[in-house]
Amino acid sequence: MDDKSIYRIALTLIKGVGVMHARNLMQVVGDEEAVFKESSRKLEAIPRLSRRAIEEIRNPEVMRRAERELAFVTRNNLQIHFFTDKSYPQRLSQCIDAPLMLYAKGNADLNREKAISIVGTRNATRYGEEFCRKFIEEISAKLPDILIISGLAYGVDICAHRAALHNGLPTVAVLGHGLDRIYPSLHRQTAVDMLKTGALLTEFPSNTNPDKHNFVKRNRIVAGMADAVVVIESGMKGGSLTTADIANSYFREVFALPGRIRDKMSIGCNQLISDNKAVLLRGSDHFISYMGWEEDAKPALPVQKEIFPALSDEEEKLFNLLSNRGAVQVNTLAIELNIPVTELFLILLEMEMKHIVESLPGGMYQLV
């Protein structure tokens, strides 16, 4: 724990100051500590920072709550991942509404080379659960270092976590409450078993109840941390459909398991496929191929840069990375080049028009 932890926690506790506002504040004043130590006069000079927000920053109760939360974190040996830390999930950091900070318990590497989120209904059928277990078993044999992410809920979530543990894969549960409890309590033992190579993760401080809106909010973390979201089963409505929509907005690949048209727990997946919001999932081989994750994939041969027209600085960096690595997933490119995904797509489009790069299934790009 570093000496800025208390200010990082406090920054998330200011009423009326959301993620974007807090990031802007840090950019203007310098860092998280300066937000609380800057004079009121300088804070008043910041555009669009209301007097009420300044009063909340100055409210001594914010620091008192932060002190109590830091004591809880220290006492329970939790980790804090601030959005400026290297340990923070770098895929998530590219999302505009990513939380400022995450609390974690366990030993998971949140930045493994490959990560997928598996979500679905709480009322999973035998068909859904059997597919989930078989899919993870086959994935583990071909990609033994992949990270499995879900939400510890009943149904598909807990099936995914337990299948990952059974096959020796690290797995992370994103929670809709603080780390002072496990919900549902029936999944406590699975949560404990996950801690050795996985983790429990949340943006919520202790004493946060597992309210419905918190689970809706956490879905953006489930979507943003992964390269792809797999929806196993879903009714006409449900949190997994929300997660799929968020994943699409983040330019993540979304896959859905098809089912019979009259099966209630397949309606959502079938609709995602019908609306072109998800790829029809046929199995692990199809998934790995679509994502460009075949183990025997060979890097592209080096390409002479001289044959292309003049490149901008951003294009040259992208060219050099693809020249050394072969095909690379767009979210990985964004992280390694430190370019927001939305801006990166514009650069890639320009390079496609110049016939320098080409797009592949699974959000992969390589030099032509």
Image: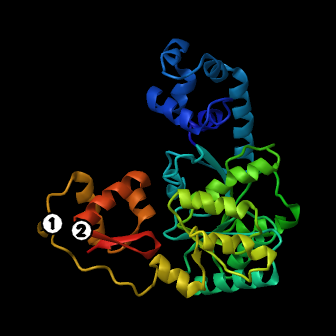
The answer to whether one can see residue 178 in this image is no
Q: Tell me where residue 13 sits by quadrant.
A: top right
Badge 1 or badge 2: first in the primary sequence: 1
Toward the left, the furthest residue is 306
What residue is shown with label 2?
356
Horizontal arrangement in the rendering, residue 276 relative to residue 329 (left or right)? right
Q: Which mark is residue 308?
A: 1
* Amino acid found under the numbered disc labelled 2: Ile
Above or below, 198 against 101 in this view is below
Q: Say what secondary structure mark 1 lies in.
A: loop
x, y percent for residue 65: 73, 31
x, y percent for residue 291: 48, 76
Horizontal arrangement in the rendering, residue 335 relative to residue 308 (left or right)? right
Q: Are marks 1 and 2 in contact (CB under 8 Å)?
A: yes
Residue at position x 62%, y 73% in the image: 274
97, 361: nearer the viewer:
361
Task: Please state, as top left, top right, bottom left or bottom right, where the N terminus lies in the image.
Answer: top right
Horizontal arrangement in the rendering, residue 291 relative to residue 298 (left or right)? right
x, y percent for residue 225: 57, 60
Residue at position x 52%, y 18% in the image: 43
6, 47: nearer the viewer:
47
Above or below, 52 against 193 in this view is above
Residue at position x 82%, y 48% in the image: 211
Residue at position x 54%, y 26% in the image: 35
Task: Please state, as top left, top right, bottom left or bottom right, where the C terminus lies in the image.
Answer: bottom left
Q: Say what secondary structure mark 2 lies in.
A: loop
Q: What is the CA distance from the residue labelled 1 to the residue labelled 2?
A: 7 Å
